[in-house]
Amino acid sequence: MANRSDTKTRILDAAEKLFAERGFSETSLRLITSKAEVNLASVNYHFGSKKELIRAVLARYLDVFMPGASTELTKLAQSSENASLETIFSALVRPLLDLNKVRTEGTRIFLQLLGRGYIESQGHLRWFITTHYGEHLDRFVQVVSQSAPHIPPAEMFWRLHFTLGTVVFTMASSDALMEIAEADFKEQNDIESVIRKVIPYMAAGVAVPVSKA
């Protein structure tokens, strides 16, 4: 049993790293098995298919982040009926940082994987996330919509996806951004400070009134 568990973990670890670096489409099962030092039969045994492996890689993070985010949003709703968007987004920082307990640099890896899913049009991932974590997603959209009731649902859909894209891009280039900030402005940053820097920008973007032009 221990050997089976170790094999499954090795496959997940190898797949996660390759998916984040190369993307889902460009990462073959042969490449994953080579890095994990297992045979193809092991992947088929534990996951059944590449799609299921992709979902399992993301589930390691989503199973931690989604309930954590919902808990923080529930606490926020109980303490403040009219929380600002900046406060709402800030409530997600701790659940995001908790992903570093799942894996080293888990926060960054998770957001990179999420970004890959959107960039590469992995439709099955949207189905997987909405099916397995729909309650948590609905909770987030509900809280955000209550904070910005002047934004129509269709417009909110776009703005929240623009927000996700902003976070994904920022995390994907965070190392370079932190190096530039240190060299040009003598700033010392870490992942948490970078996330907190982008929150006011995102909150302002989501809340700006819809143009009537």
Image: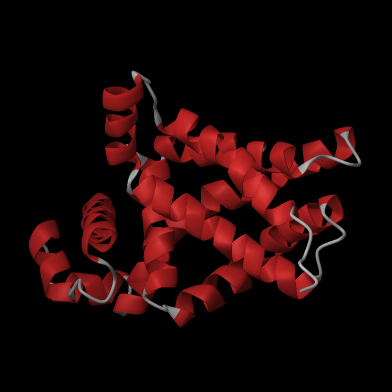
Q: Is residue 68 left or right of residue 5?
A: right
Count up the numbered dots. 0
Query: Which percent across, then down, holds residue 58?
Result: 42, 60
Residue 42 lies, with reference to residue 94, above or below; the image says below
Residue, x 18% and y 74% (percent of image)?
29
Residue, x 48% and y 28% (percent of image)?
193
Query: Which percent across, then down, holds residue 47?
Result: 33, 72
Residue, x 33% and y 38% (percent of image)?
177
Closer to the camera in the image, 66 or 24: 24
Closer to the camera in the image, 205 or 30: 205
Colouring scheme, one of rainbow, by chain, secondary structure, one colour: secondary structure
Query: Which percent across, then down, holds residue 17?
Result: 24, 54
- Quadrant location of the N terminus? bottom left
Residue 110 is at least partly visible in this image:
no
Closer to the camera in the image, 42 or 153: 153
Residue, x 29% and y 38% (percent of image)?
175
Residue 44 lies, with reference to residue 97, above or below; the image says below
Closer to the camera in the image, 8 or 80: 80
Q: Is residue 149 left or right of residue 128?
A: right
Q: Residue placed farthest to the right in the image? A: 81
- Quadrant location of the C terminus? bottom right
Q: Is residue 15 left or right of residue 78?
A: left
Query: Which percent across, then down, holds residue 24?
Result: 29, 71
Quarter of image, res 180:
top left
Residue 44 is at least partly visible in this image:
yes
Quarter of image, res 136:
bottom right
Q: Is residue 91 left or right of residue 108?
A: right
